[in-house]
Image: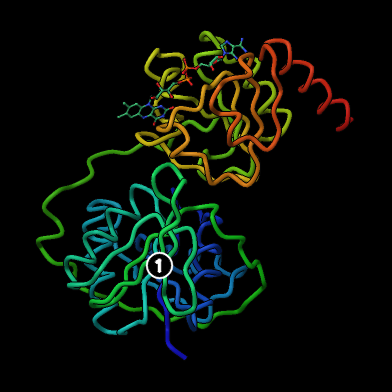
């Protein structure tokens, strides 16, 4: 059986559920080996976190360069592992860090790359949704080792318990990969809400909030959801740009996306159209976002959201 590498997705030292999604996609192709890039002394703890996904082997590489030289060090080591292991494919999370690592690895290993896949078949055909989700594309890499980035939340993770074999490797990191240094970094302020791209439910507000996100936030909190925003809202300074959903913001694919006071411009849809269910709250029945809604409420969000929040909270107690 061919071996497939995944780059285990650790953010701030914590394994994300995207690792299990990558492993689930990779298991369609072959035996899954997770590559763990950890700071010195933390490889064992990182590897121990990978016990709930279809992973057969874990390759641990420890280096503090992953902290100081970020993507360049990660790409350098991953390229060396590909040369040593000759995998059938490499799957990486499709976020900013993952896509930059993937791009560098593809160049270094003279391989083809596909980004933002939402599925990968057993024959390594990747599925992408393009043009704001309106067109489905199937593609295959014909040169080198297929490097594919997979969108978080696109694949239902197989959370089976495993006891993978663990191998520790060491590599010299090339001087070329040390030409820029991270001088400081600060984890994002989460405020108790889940990370936008990983959340099962996202409640987003747009221009219709008129700058008051309190009803959106209260509804999100009643559901344990992340809060998103349209670009109209982030450009107006009503919500941080880090929460923007869309073509020039983040791509989300939650189980439920709630769009409040958002018209549904193509650039917004591009970032949320693959959500499993879409609920729209908008006072204009002609708003284009209703075209992609599974459920719709025509009404004022300031009237609808507090009632919905009350209803959810009442059911919880
Ligand atoms: C290159 C480029 C990239 C872009 N990238 C993005 C992106 O990443 N993400 C993004 O979102 N946009 C992006 N845009 C902007 C996009 O084109 C739209 O302008 C933007 O999405 C509109 O935001 P909105 O839906 O909040 O506002 P509007 O289009 O103004 O819609 C507001 C909606 O709120 C409704 N409403 C008003 N009051 C209420 C109320 N009290 N209760 C209920 N409903 C109410 C209205 O009926 C209306 O439908 C981009 C544009 C360009 C050109």
Question: Looking at this view, is 228 or 58 the one in front?
Answer: 228
- In the picture shown, does residue 39 fall above or below 82? above
Splitting the image into 4 quarters, where does residue 268 fall? top left
Q: Report the residue at 58% width, 74% height from top.
A: 54
**CA neighbours of label 1 inside 10 A, class few (<14), some (14 to 19), many (20+):** many
Q: What is the count of numbered marks?
A: 1
Residue picked out by circle 1:
91
Indicate yes or no: mark 1 CB to ligand 1 under 8 Å: no
Q: Is residue 308 left or right of residue 59?
A: right
Q: Report the residue at 36% width, 76% height from top.
A: 89
Coordinates of residue 101 in the picture (x, y in percent): 28, 58
Question: Looking at this view, is 14 or 266 the one in front?
Answer: 266
Quarter placement of the C terminus: top right
Coordinates of residue 50 in the picture (x, y in percent): 55, 68
Residue lying at the far front of the rendered structure:
286
Q: Is residue 116 left or right of residue 283?
A: left
């Amino acid at each position: 059986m061919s071996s497939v590498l995944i780059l285990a997705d650790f953010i701030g030292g914590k394994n994300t559920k995207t690792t299990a999604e990558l492993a689930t996609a990779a298991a369609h192709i072959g035996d899954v080996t997770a590559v763990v890039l950890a700071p010195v002394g933390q490889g064992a703890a990182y590897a121990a976190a990978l016990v709930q996904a279809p992973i057969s082997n874990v390759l641990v590489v420890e280096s503090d360069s992953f902290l100081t030289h970020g993507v360049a060090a990660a790409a350098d080591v991953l390229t060396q592992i590909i040369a040593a292991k000759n995998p059938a494919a490499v799957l990486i999370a499709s976020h900013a860090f993952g896509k930059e690592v993937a791009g560098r690895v593809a160049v270094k290993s003279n391989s083809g790359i596909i980004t933002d896949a939402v599925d990968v078949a057993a024959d390594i055909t990747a599925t992408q949704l393009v043009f704001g989700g309106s067109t489905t594309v199937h593609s295959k890499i014909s040169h080198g080792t297929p490097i594919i980035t997979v969108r978080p939340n696109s694949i239902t993770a197989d959370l089976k318990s495993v006891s993978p074999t663990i191998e520790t490797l060491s590599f010299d990191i090339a001087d070329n990969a040390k030409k820029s240094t991270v001088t400081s970094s600060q984890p994002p302020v989460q405020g108790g809400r889940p990370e936008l791209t990983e959340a099962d439910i996202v409640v987003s507000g747009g221009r219709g909030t008129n700058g008051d996100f309190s009803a959106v936030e209260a509804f999100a909190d009643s559901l344990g959801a992340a809060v998103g925003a349209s670009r109209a809202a982030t450009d107006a300074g009503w919500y941080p740009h880090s929460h923007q959903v869309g073509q020039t913001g983040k791509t989300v694919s939650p189980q439920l996306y709630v769009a409040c006071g958002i018209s549904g411009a193509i650039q917004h849809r591009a970032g949320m159209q693959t959500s499993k269910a879409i609920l729209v709250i908008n006072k204009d029945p002609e708003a284009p976002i209703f075209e992609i809604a599974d459920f719709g409420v025509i009404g004022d969000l300031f009237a609808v959201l507090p009632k919905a929040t009350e209803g959810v909270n009442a059911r919880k107690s």
